[in-house]
Image (cartoon, rainbow, N blue to C red):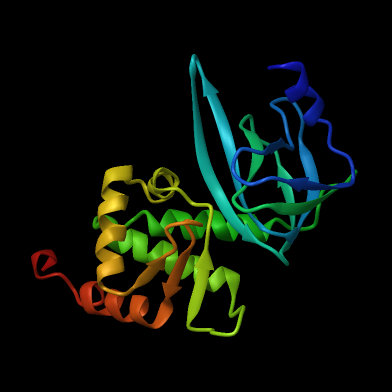
């Protein structure tokens, strides 16, 4: 571990501003249990853990957190817990000397993402992810039937729903043609059309599959 990375593992109460995408903040290390509050003042972040096995390092997304969210987390795991700014973000950390009272927020996200990965059809998993993101963000903005999502690459979406980048790219192209999403080519921002997404999920996946009977 580089010295700069070691320095970042010392968590104190602070507010930090993170630039988009490449900025990471290590908030735990392998040898210490951490109890802390995490508040997203502005932006959109990905909470994830890193697991070093031999010469390989893997990432697992645990939650996607929008501005206005505050959660208490207790992390006691050998995996390093980190955040990535999917948009330019401002984040407040508040370390606790005593164990926090609850980490239900994180537990709920882990369970939601686990359930999303269960359907065999990757398109169904993708639609479920988008509906979950819309639900977690709430009805923000002038149009409650739409939700804006940015900062998630095709590769990252694939990691979250256990799929591949080419498959995600193919599905997103189809979803654009179906008017389920709109994509700004310049900003890479996706506008989720929630009514159409929910209707398409019901149309394609709500009914029992004949081959399962």
Taking the spot 63% from the left edge, 47% from the top edge, the residue there is 20
Rendered position, 87 above or below 29:
below
- Image coordinates of residue 149 in percent, x first then y, are 52, 63
Front residue of 200/101: it is: 200
Taking the spot 79% from the left edge, 57% from the top edge, the residue there is 101
Q: Report whether 137 appears left or right of 146.
A: right
Location of the C terminus (image quadrant):
bottom left
Rendered position, 76 above or below 208:
above
- Image coordinates of residue 5 in percent, x first then y, are 73, 24
- Image coordinates of residue 211 in percent, x first then y, are 9, 65
Taking the spot 73% from the left edge, 67% from the top edge, the residue there is 68
Location of the N terminus (image quadrant):
top right
Q: Would residue 176 be visible to someone looking at this image?
A: yes
- The quarter of the picture where residue 165 lies is top left
Tally of marks: 0
Taking the spot 53% from the left edge, 73% from the top edge, the residue there is 135
Q: Report whether 191 appears left or right of 88.
A: left
Q: Would residue 164 be visible to someone looking at this image?
A: no
């Amino acid at each position: 571990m580089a010295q700069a990375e070691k320095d970042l593992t010392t968590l104190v109460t602070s507010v930090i501003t993170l630039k988009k995408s490449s900025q990471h903040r290590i908030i735990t290390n392998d040898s210490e249990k951490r109890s802390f509050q995490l508040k997203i003042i502005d932006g959109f972040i990905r909470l994830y853990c890193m697991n070093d096995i031999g010469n390989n390092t893997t990432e697992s997304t645990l939650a996607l957190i929008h501005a206005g969210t505050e959660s208490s987390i207790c992390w006691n795991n050998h995996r390093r817990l980190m955040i990535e700014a999917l948009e330019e973000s401002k984040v407040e950390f508040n370390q606790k000397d005593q164990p926090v009272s609850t980490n239900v927020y994180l537990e709920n996200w882990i369970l939601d993402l686990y359930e999303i990965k269960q359907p065999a059809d990757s398109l169904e998993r993708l639609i479920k992810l988008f509906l979950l993101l819309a639900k977690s963000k709430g009805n923000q903005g002038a149009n409650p039937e739409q939700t804006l999502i940015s900062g998630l690459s095709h590769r990252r979406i694939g990691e979250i729903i256990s799929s591949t980048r080419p498959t995600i790219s193919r599905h997103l192209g189809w979803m654009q043609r179906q008017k389920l999403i709109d994509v700004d080519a310049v900003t890479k921002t996706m506008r989720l059309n929630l009514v159409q997404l929910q209707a398409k999920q019901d149309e394609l996946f709500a009914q029992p599959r004949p081959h399962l009977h």
